[in-house]
Amino acid sequence: ATDPELVGTGERVADAYAELCAGYAVDVDALIGENLIQQKGDGVVALEGIALATMCPHHLMPALGTATVAYAANDRIIGIGAIARVVDAFSRRLTLQETIGAEVTRVLYKHLAPRWVSCRISMQHSCMSARGERRHGAQLVTHAILGDREEAMWNLK
């Protein structure tokens, strides 16, 4: 007899992985292009607390956390919802946390041409807590910066 709790599990797992890997279907360049605003800016724009989830490409286990994206505006800005969608597009893939930050900063730097852009990510990886080292609560923090690194670090203190 089959355990009733296992009926449909294969389909649920497939649906979950399809959702967790949905970022591959997003054209990030188009997303940004549709949300660019031509506006002179001279301040720092920072969006904190962007929830994100990704799948470790090594163990196919989830990592959960938050991102902060900041940039020093020049002649273009982008809607804050679009910033969150860019983070989501890159995190909803089989990818490393370091790659998410690098891709977010690369694409925003390309389209916004800011003085600098940064993406700080803090995540708990289930491959670190549920197996292997079993270090519950350990956070991996990464910080990608493109552009004027010195100005970025001063502004992000």
Image: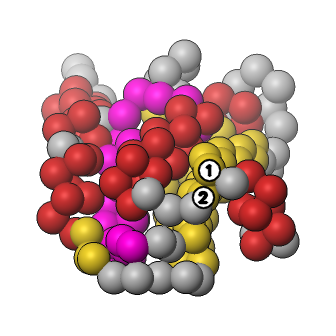
| Left or right: 123 as drawn, with respect to 79 | right
| Left or right: 153 as drawn, with respect to 102 | right
In the rendered structure, which amino acid carries the disc numbered 1?
Gly
In the rendered structure, which amino acid carries the disc numbered 2?
Trp
Near-viewer residue (94 or 1)? 94
Residue 82 horizontal/vertical position (percent): 31, 67
- Tag shown at residue 116: 2
Mark 1 or mark 2: whose residue is earlier in sequence:
2
Q: Mark 1 points at which residue?
A: 147
Q: CB atoms at circles 1 and 2 under 8 Å apart?
A: yes
Q: How far apart are marks 1 and 2 (CA)?
A: 4 Å
Q: In which quarter of the image is the C terminus?
A: bottom right
Residue 155 horizontal/vertical position (percent): 76, 72
**Which type of secondary structure does the marked residue at label 2 adopt?**
strand
| Left or right: 28 as drawn, with respect to 51 | left
| Left or right: 142 as drawn, with respect to 6 | right
Near-viewer residue (89 or 41)? 41
Residue 62 horizontal/vertical position (percent): 51, 38
Up-down relation of residue 131 to residue 118 (above or below): above
User: What are the residue bounds of the magenta stretch?
Assistant: 75-97
Up-down relation of residue 124 to residue 81 (above or below): above
- Residue depicted at x 15% and y 64%: 34
Q: Is residue 92 magenta?
A: yes
Q: Is residue 85 magenta?
A: yes
| Residue 136 occupies quadrant | top right
Q: In which quarter of the image is the N terminus?
A: top left
- Residue depicted at x 80% and y 56%: 150
- Residue depicted at x 54% and y 16%: 58
Residue 2 horizontal/vertical position (percent): 24, 23
Q: Which residue lies furthest to the top in this view?
A: 58
